[in-house]
């Protein structure tokens, strides 16, 4: 959940309104506000802006329901990158919400570094004790809960069905469940249970007591990381994105607010409602030695994950304002290359540069580097520039996916296979397991009683969430 407000919402809508009335001049003048922050961009020749249709909603996330030519259901690939230590295939089983017997999941196969299997336990909200609300959004809330049986702590995401229907998010929540029920990766938040009641949908996931990575950044001196620490977290994010691409998904909403900090200090990606699947699965390619690769960390460039998302081309206008890639704004359609643009913005922000990626700036101005509290190397600046290339077809990552990015000289000394066993730069200091000080304080507007939740009638035939299946995953 984010603390950022919609201060720029009006300006964004004005931006599109102006586009209907006038043509942008060949050269844009610098905005007066940019002079105050040292101008993070330099002027560049602009082209005519294409009209874009947008729909703003809370927390500056921009969403337009998919109306594109991309596909709807992912199929996993058959080659696994050794960099992340994925060791074997695992079939995940699931209990249907309308059946009393175990059935094979539609989510097919997942790469896994550990054992993942189903137990026959029926899970309901009554099996959990509500401790505290730790997150709040436009369609639901997140609670810290305790399982009454094993006394373990979890994060429970509760989504309101009526709000999901109003906002036409049924397909999005199905995609999110598919990802969470399928993946088993150290840098992606793991799902343990999902189920539904008459009024709500539930995701029970790992509780990351370190809170949002955004709040961690805001709590640091000068609100930024030194370069080596930023490199560590960028590497973990790259591994998570690489895995999502490997199983045929693009993420599309990378930002500090969607990165959680585990109690060990490692990061975990969360919130997959904007992720887009590929139906026509393709196997990853092996990057051949005779193919020209930028000099750098070449020994790790093995798997071409770009091939796994090659069938995805979507015209949806989605994302978060300051992280939206140029091709999304122009409405030309976008692919997995948007994830590498958002990675560039993330690294830029982690290093303390003032995030001012307005639509005008994204389309027309080159990225520059104002003076920050900590020095930034030329190699790091080069990486950011290559990730923020406006032409998606020449952007770093557009040829072989994560392999391109991992091969960059900035990651020359990064030991990708050992990231999980490396002590992170920031390990949350907590007074105890129930310490929620790293989450923003939220007052619950209305009481939510798990005991009063009405269980779903298995004979119900008019349930638009009938395909939201009740999953119980045991991870060893």
Image: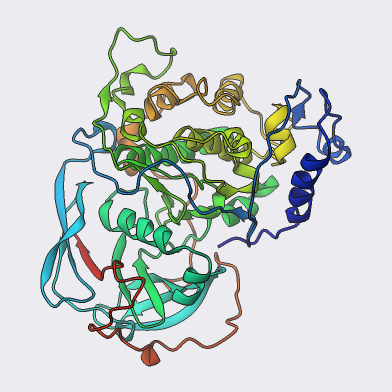
Most foreground residue, 443 or 32: 32
Taking 172 as reference, is 300 above or below it? above
Q: Is residue 109 left or right of residue 72?
A: left
The N terminus sits in image quarter: bottom right
Taking 413 as reference, is 98 above or below it? below
Give how far across and how far down residue 443 sits, in percent: 61, 80
Colouring mode (rainbow / by chain / secondary structure / one colour): rainbow
Taking 83 as reference, is 409 above or below it? above
The C terminus sits in image quarter: bottom left
Most foreground residue, 298 or 170: 170
Most foreground residue, 292 or 166: 166
Residue furthest to the right? 32
From this viewpoint, is residue 278 visible? yes
Q: Residue at x 53, y 53 (%)?
A: 213
Give how far across and how far down residue 130 sits, in percent: 42, 82
From this viewpoint, is residue 365 visible? no
Q: Quadrant of the rendered structure where residue 47 is?
A: top right
Q: Is residue 94 left or right of residue 191?
A: left
How many marks the image carries: the answer is 0
Give how far across and how far down residue 339 sits, in percent: 48, 38
Residue furthest to the top? 290
Most foreground residue, 77 or 383: 77
Give how far across and how far down residue 13 sits, in percent: 75, 51
């Amino acid at each position: 959940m984010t603390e950022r407000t919609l201060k720029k919402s009006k300006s964004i809508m004005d931006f599109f309104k102006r586009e209907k009335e006038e043509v942008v001049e060949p050269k844009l003048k610098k905005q007066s506000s940019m002079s105050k922050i040292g101008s993070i961009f330099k002027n560049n020749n602009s082209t005519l802006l294409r009209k874009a249709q947008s729909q703003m909603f809370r927390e500056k996330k921009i969403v337009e329901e998919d109306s594109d030519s991309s596909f709807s259901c992912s199929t996993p690939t058959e080659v696994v990158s050794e960099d992340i230590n994925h060791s074997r295939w695992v079939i995940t089983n699931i209990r249907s919400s309308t059946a009393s017997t175990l059935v094979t999941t539609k989510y097919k196969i997942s790469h896994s570094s550990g054992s993942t299997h189903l137990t026959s336990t029926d899970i309901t909200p009554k099996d959990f004790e509500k401790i505290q609300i730790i997150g709040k959004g436009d369609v639901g809330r997140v609670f810290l809960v305790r399982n009454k049986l094993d006394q373990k702590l979890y994060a429970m995401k509760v989504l309101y069905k009526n709000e999901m229907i109003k906002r036409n998010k049924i397909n999005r929540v199905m995609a999110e469940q598919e990802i969470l029920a399928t993946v088993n990766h150290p840098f992606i938040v793991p799902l343990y249970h999902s189920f539904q009641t008459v009024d709500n949908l539930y995701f029970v996931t790992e509780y990351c007591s370190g809170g949002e990575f955004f709040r961690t950044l805001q709590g640091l001196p000068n609100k930024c990381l030194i370069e080596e620490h930023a490199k560590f977290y960028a590497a973990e994010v790259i591994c998570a994105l690489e895995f999502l691409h490997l199983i045929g998904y693009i993420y599309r909403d990378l930002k500090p607010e969607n990165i959680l900090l585990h109690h060990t200090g490692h990061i975990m990606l969360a919130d997959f409602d904007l992720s887009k699947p590929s139906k026509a699965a393709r196997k990853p390619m092996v990057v051949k030695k005779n193919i020209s690769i930028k000099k750098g960390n070449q020994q790790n460039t093995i798997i071409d994950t770009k091939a796994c998302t090659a069938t995805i081309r979507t015209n949806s206008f989605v994302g978060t304002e300051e992280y939206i890639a140029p091709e999304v704004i122009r409405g030309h359609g976008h692919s997995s290359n948007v994830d590498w643009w958002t990675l560039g913005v993330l690294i830029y922000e982690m290093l303390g540069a003032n995030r001012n990626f307005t639509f005008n700036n994204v389309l027309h101005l080159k990225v520059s580097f104002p003076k920050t509290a900590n020095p930034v190397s030329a190699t790091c600046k080069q990486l950011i520039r290559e990730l923020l290339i406006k032409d998606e077809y020449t952007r770093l990552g557009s040829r072989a996916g994560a392999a391109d990015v991992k091969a960059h000289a900035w990651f020359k000394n990064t030991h990708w296979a050992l990231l999980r066993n490396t002590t992170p730069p920031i390990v949350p200091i907590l007074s105890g397991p129930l310490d929620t000080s790293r989450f923003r304080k939220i007052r619950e507007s209305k009481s939510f009683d798990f005991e009063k939740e009405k269980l779903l009638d298995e004979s119900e035939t008019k349930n638009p969430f009938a395909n939201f299946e009740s999953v119980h995953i045991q991870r060893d």
